[in-house]
Amino acid sequence: MNKHVAIITFNPAYDLIGYTNKIHYGAMNSLTTTGLHAAGKGINVAKILKYLDIDITVGGFLGKENKDGFQKLFTTMNFYNYFKLVEGRTRVNVKVTEQNGALTEFNFSGFTVTKQAWETFSNDSLIWLKKFDILCISGSLPKGIRLSSFTQWMKKLNECCPFIIFDSSQETLVAGLEARPWLIKPNHHELETLVGKKLPTIEDIVTSARSIQKKGITNVVVSLGSQGAIWVTASEEWMAKPPSCHVVSTIGAGDAMVGGMIYGLCMNHSSEHTFRLATALSALTVSQGSVEISDRAKLDIMMARIVLHPYQTMITGETQ
């Protein structure tokens, strides 16, 4: 039986996505527009799970002035909508991919959440979120939400929902870790920022992920781009590597991985199957340049091409 899943994204964005052969800084650049999407990390996770036939409830904040694109998406995708409208505009993120696969992002500011709006949402959410088995909190915080208030809210959520998946960065990531969520998914750079040092080798990454896991985070998944990903639990260490593929865009790849991890949890899949699926979803997103599953057969083929091993097996018997 499918579990009830809610996804909270406080700072969604309209993603304006473009492509160019090479960015020329300080000069005019002509871009090929590939899409304008109602998005944000949590929305991307919700899309993946909906494509996998999981019913999704979404919540957070939207700016009143440009809400229509998101509300159309929620209707089209059949999301249950708990977003609260606030004064102002939801931000726009410009994402430009170059021919060599490099992604440059320009993330603009958006609405500001008032103290009253935050208190209303946080208090109400602690009531309606009690009915969910799995909760994903994804993305950054908009202006107006204090980090300390966010931490306290997450700690209270832990009392009613034991399976909290948290994916953020910078100071929001640090604030959320204080609540000891069940699973986090930093990328390589974010993990280095958390531990305060460079992590040049896979062994360094695993060791640092293990140190965080021992502080009370049950699962630490580290995404490593083309190198794949590492998953550290209290009893297991897995490494997954995708096949070489043409990079159309890396936008949403990490979110697709989070969606795969949540799906595995929903369906009570084994660790191996869950991680293989999550890595395949990430690789598929990179190769097609969109956060969707348009062809389940392609996903099955990608899953079969993922190289996955327990990490200790790789140390003793195979190349890292």
Image: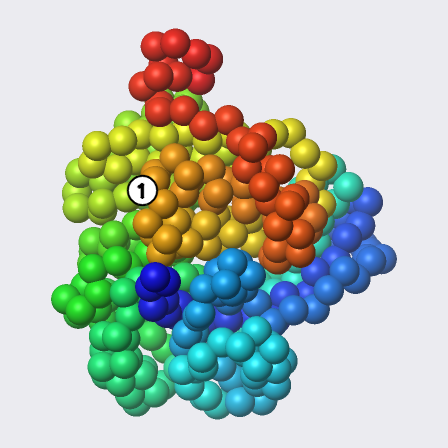
Q: Is residue 126 left or right of residue 319?
A: left
Q: Name the quadrant of the N terminus.
A: bottom left
Q: Is residue 95 left or right of residue 170?
A: right
Give the percent coordinates (x, y) of residue 157: 21, 68
Q: Residue at x 64, y 45 (%)?
A: 297
Give the percent coordinates (x, y) of residue 171: 34, 57
Furthest-top residue in this view: 317
Q: Quadrant of residue 57?
A: bottom left
Give the percent coordinates (x, y) of residue 241: 51, 29
From the viewer's perspective, is residue 98 above or below residue 121? above
Q: Residue at x 39, y 49 (%)?
A: 264
Q: Is residue 15 left or right of residue 222?
A: right
Residue 114 can be seen, yes or no: yes
Q: How many marks?
A: 1
Looking at the rendered structure, the secondary structure element under dot 1 is strand
Amino acid under disc 1: Val
Q: Quadrant of residue 122?
A: bottom left
From the viewer's perspective, is residue 167 above or below residue 53? above
Q: Is residue 52 left or right of residue 296?
A: left
From the viewer's perspective, is residue 68 above or below residue 6? below
Q: Which residue position is annotated with label 1?
A: 220
Q: Name the quadrant of the C terminus.
A: top left
From the viewer's perspective, is residue 121 above or below residue 8? below
Q: Residue at x 26, y 85 (%)?
A: 124
Give the percent coordinates (x, y) of residue 295: 66, 52
Q: Residue at x 22, y 65 (%)?
A: 161
Crowding around mark 1 (Cα neighbors within 10 Å: few <14, some 14 to 19, many 20+) is many
Furthest-front residue in this view: 1
Q: How is the image coloured?
A: rainbow
Q: Quadrant of residue 30?
A: bottom right
Residue 70 can be seen, yes or no: no
